[in-house]
Amino acid sequence: MRIPLFSKGGKREIDPVCDMQVDTGKPPGGSFEYQGTTYYFCGPGCNRAFQREPEAYLSGEKKIQM
């Protein structure tokens, strides 16, 4: 029996706000498309923060420490 939390099956991306790894199949914080690129989030708070200031997070000017 596999425990989904620990399985290594899905593709992963890095949350641009907090740098956590996120499963792209079921991202807990959803996803958001910005300038033709889809970004995935660990939680709703990171998604909202990114939507308010995407350039600040993409440039590295802002990061949230988890």
Image (cartoon, rainbow, N blue to C red):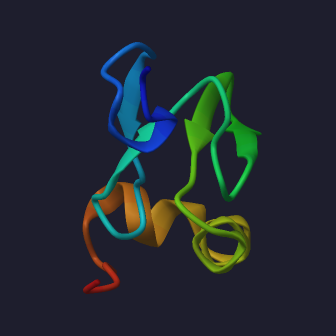
Going 44% across and 35% down the picture, which residue do you hit? Answer: 3
Going 34% across and 84% down the picture, which residue do you hit? Answer: 64
Using residue 65 as the reference point, say whether residue 5 is left or right of it: right
Using residue 25 as the reference point, say whether residue 56 is left or right of it: left
Q: Position of residue 40 (x, y in %)?
A: 57, 42
Going 63% across and 43% down the picture, which residue do you hit? Answer: 27
Quadrant of the frame with the N terminus: top left
In front here: 3 or 29? 3
Q: Quadrant of residue 65?
A: bottom left
Q: Position of residue 50 (x, y in %)?
A: 61, 67
Q: Is residue 34 above or below residue 46?
A: above
Q: Position of residue 44 (x, y in %)?
A: 72, 71
Using residue 41 as the reference point, say whether residue 28 is left or right of it: right
Q: Is residue 24 above or below residue 19?
A: above
Going 67% across and 34% down the picture, which residue do you hit? Answer: 26
Q: Is residue 39 above or below residue 42?
A: above
Quadrant of the frame with the C terminus: bottom left
Q: Position of residue 33 (x, y in %)?
A: 74, 36
In front here: 29 or 47? 29
Residue at the bottom extreme of this rendering: 65
